[in-house]
Image (cartoon, rainbow, N blue to C red):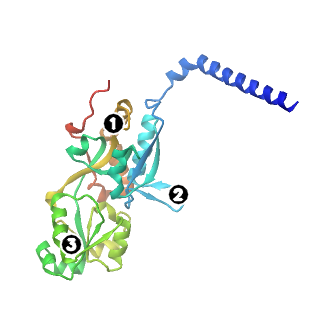
């Protein structure tokens, strides 16, 4: 008897499946008409770099910051489900090119990288040097800083830096004057504890700091020639061309209608948001026409 019931159960499951397919087929035209632009994208993993105001995960598990809001906006505009996870500068690009993660934020743009990925959102940035006001007053130039062997510069370990910044780090490291941290949050903790004299930093990392704290600090513009672009990239090898184009179209529309600027002001504040100038994607990064 149990065997008969089992056979009946299998029959009913097959009938229910067939009925579901039939009903789906009958409703197909209407479903297609209401289909979002990005239908068929499925779920894409996206890795974000933890950075104050740019991406943080709260104690409640909520993803916050500019890049988290970019992920939500792209998802809403394309229909793609973007599953956020954290990464670090060491893993970021290898994970993208190997296919471990198809989409990432915080990637520095180069023409060579544009051959491997389509860039979606790019901001023009440059690093500055954060120092206590008293230290800055005693060392108003980079030459003065370099001449004091007691001063240490803190950097994020293995982060890709612009040419002049990297050359400076390469000069100080053999002198034992570079301190490495795994991420910017840890580096700022070391700075506040007095373990480093200065920090190579993007101004946006100071989002959320009080006016009283900021009044005691100085941002030294010692690397003006090192402006660079960084942002969101999607793997050409591991993501279909049609999906990449949907993401690019949505990102460009958000740039043109001011959405990215609005989200920068929301997450970083007006004083810092102007350091996050969202710029057009260089022509060399444009994807080939979908076939």
Q: Is residue 126 above or below residue 209?
A: above
Residue 194 shown left or right of residue 81 in the figure: left
Most extreme residue toward the left, as rendered?
143
Q: Which numbered mark, 3 or 1, is in the foreground of this view?
A: 3
Residue 248, picture quadrant = top left
Q: Position of residue 241 (x, y in %)?
A: 35, 31
Q: Secondary structure at mark 1?
A: helix
At 32% across and 44% down in the image, what residue appears?
A: 233
In the image, residue 179 lies at what x, y percent?
Answer: 28, 73
The reply to whether callout 3 and callout 1 are in contact (CB within 8 Å) is no
- Give the percent coordinates (x, y) of residue 251: 34, 39
The residue carrying mark 1 is 248
Image-based side of 20 in relation to 47, left or right: right
Q: CA distance from mark 3 to mark 2?
A: 37 Å
Secondary element type, mark 2 = loop
> Which residue is drawn at the image coordinates 26% and 56% (left, top)?
275
Q: Quadrant of the N terminus?
A: top right
Q: Nearer the viewer, residue 177 or 264?
A: 177
Alpha carbon distance from label 2 to label 1: 28 Å
- Mark 3 lies on residue: 173
Classify mark 2: residues with Cα within 10 Å, few (<14), some (14-19) or many (20+): few
Name the residue carrying label 2.
61
Residue 165 image-quadrant placement: bottom left
């Amino acid at each position: 008897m149990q065997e008969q019931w089992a056979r009946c159960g299998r029959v009913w499951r097959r009938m229910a499946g067939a009925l579901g397919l039939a009903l789906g087929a009958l409703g197909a035209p209407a479903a297609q008409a209401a289909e979002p632009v990005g239908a068929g994208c499925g779920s894409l993993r996206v890795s974000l770099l933890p950075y104050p105001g740019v991406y943080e995960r709260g104690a409640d598990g909520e993803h916050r910051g500019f890049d988290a809001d970019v992920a939500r906006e792209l998802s809403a505009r394309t229909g793609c489900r973007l599953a956020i996870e954290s990464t670090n500068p060491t893993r970021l690009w290898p994970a993208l090119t190997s296919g471990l993660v198809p989409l990432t934020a915080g990637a520095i743009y180069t023409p060579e990288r544009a051959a491997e990925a389509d860039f979606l959102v790019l901001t023009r940035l440059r690093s500055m040097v954060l120092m206590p006001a008293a230290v800055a007053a005693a060392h108003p130039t980079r030459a003065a800083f370099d001449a004091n062997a007691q001063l240490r510069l803190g950097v994020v370990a293995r982060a890709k830096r612009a040419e002049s910044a990297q050359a400076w780090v390469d000069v100080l490291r053999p002198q034992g004057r570079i301190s490495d941290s795994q991420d910017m949050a840890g580096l700022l903790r070391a700075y506040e504890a007095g373990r480093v004299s200065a920090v190579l930093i993007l101004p946006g990392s100071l989002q959320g700091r009080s006016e009283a704290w900021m009044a005691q600090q100085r941002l030294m513009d010692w690397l003006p020639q090192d402006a660079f672009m960084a942002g969101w990239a999607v793997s050409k090898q591991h993501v279909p061309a049609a999906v990449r184009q949907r993401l690019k179209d949505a990102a460009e529309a958000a740039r043109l209608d001011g959405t990215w600027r609005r989200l920068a002001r929301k997450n970083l504040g007006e004083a810092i948001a102007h350091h996050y100038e969202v710029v057009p994607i260089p022509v060399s990064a444009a994807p080939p026409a979908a076939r």
